[in-house]
Image: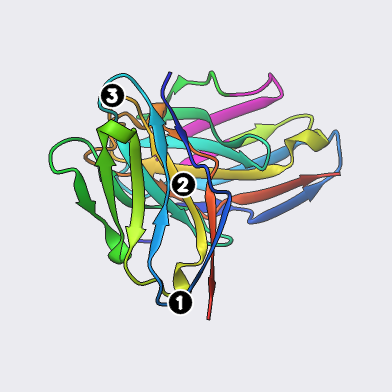
Amino acid sequence: AQSVTQPDIHITVSEGASLELRCNYSYGATPYLFWYVQSPGQGLQLLLKYFSGDTLVQGIKGFEAEFKRSQSSFNLRKPSVHWSDAAEYFCATSGDTGTASKLTFGTGTRLQVTL
Amino acid sequence: DAGVIQSPRHEVTEMGQEVTLRCKPISGHNSLFWYRQTMMRGLELLIYFNNNVPIDDSGMPEDRFSAKMPNASFSTLKIQPSEPRDSAVYFCASSFGVAIGNSPLHFGNGTRLTVT
């Protein structure tokens, strides 16, 4: 079964600093991968997705992620963090399908931004 | 577009009481999903509907949980009787179809349920 692992439970960065959130996937074939953000008291919002093709994908709010098959990783990056980026971030996979019912979420990384 | 609307935002109830959570999906979306989020288990899919028909309810934890979708614009998740371990945030999400490559999931703001 597919799964994703987010090794960092909590990360703190200074505003303006760069950010990288880690996600490792476990799946035999190339999986469908997603990053979601959850602001306090809100539902999850899709930041970006990867299915195939270019391994560097651009998302909303200035985020990008890079698929690296050799490392089984799909890390989320942002060159300069804003205080409004403080939230919880979830990596997810649906295996080799693009089916919502097969979505499996990681445990999340909580991002704190200091001014 | 009002987004996915869930009610109530917060629900506090006593053990043994019936709880009903409500969801209005985005107009035009024909797939609806109920999720539960807890610290211990993270985000879990409970059940999903396509064209108002329940497709997969294997995530529903027990017979105390039931969900209905009487029409395209309304769904309920009911817990009867409720127990303290049901305390969680329950999310509803909708999409056009189940292929999220074409239509992403849109989540509501959730219902925080506390059972004392």
- Circle 3: residue type: Asp
Tell me which residue sits at (68%, 20%) in the image.
B62
Tell me which residue sits at (69%, 55%) in the image.
B10
Label 3 belongs to which residue? A96
Q: Give the percent coordinates (x, y) of residue B31.
A: 36, 35
Q: Does label 3 lie on the same chain as label 1?
A: yes
Quote the CA–CA distance across marks 3 and 2. 19 Å
- Circle 2: residue type: Phe
Q: Which residues are magenta?
A: B60-76
Chain under label 1? Answer: A
Q: Which mark is residue A90?
A: 2
Q: Decide whether residue B67 is among the magenta residues.
A: yes
Is residue B71 visible in the rendered image? The answer is no
Q: Give the percent coordinates (x, y) of residue A40.
A: 57, 62
Q: Decide whether residue A91 is among the magenta residues.
A: no
User: Eyeballing the image, is A82 above or below B8?
Assistant: below
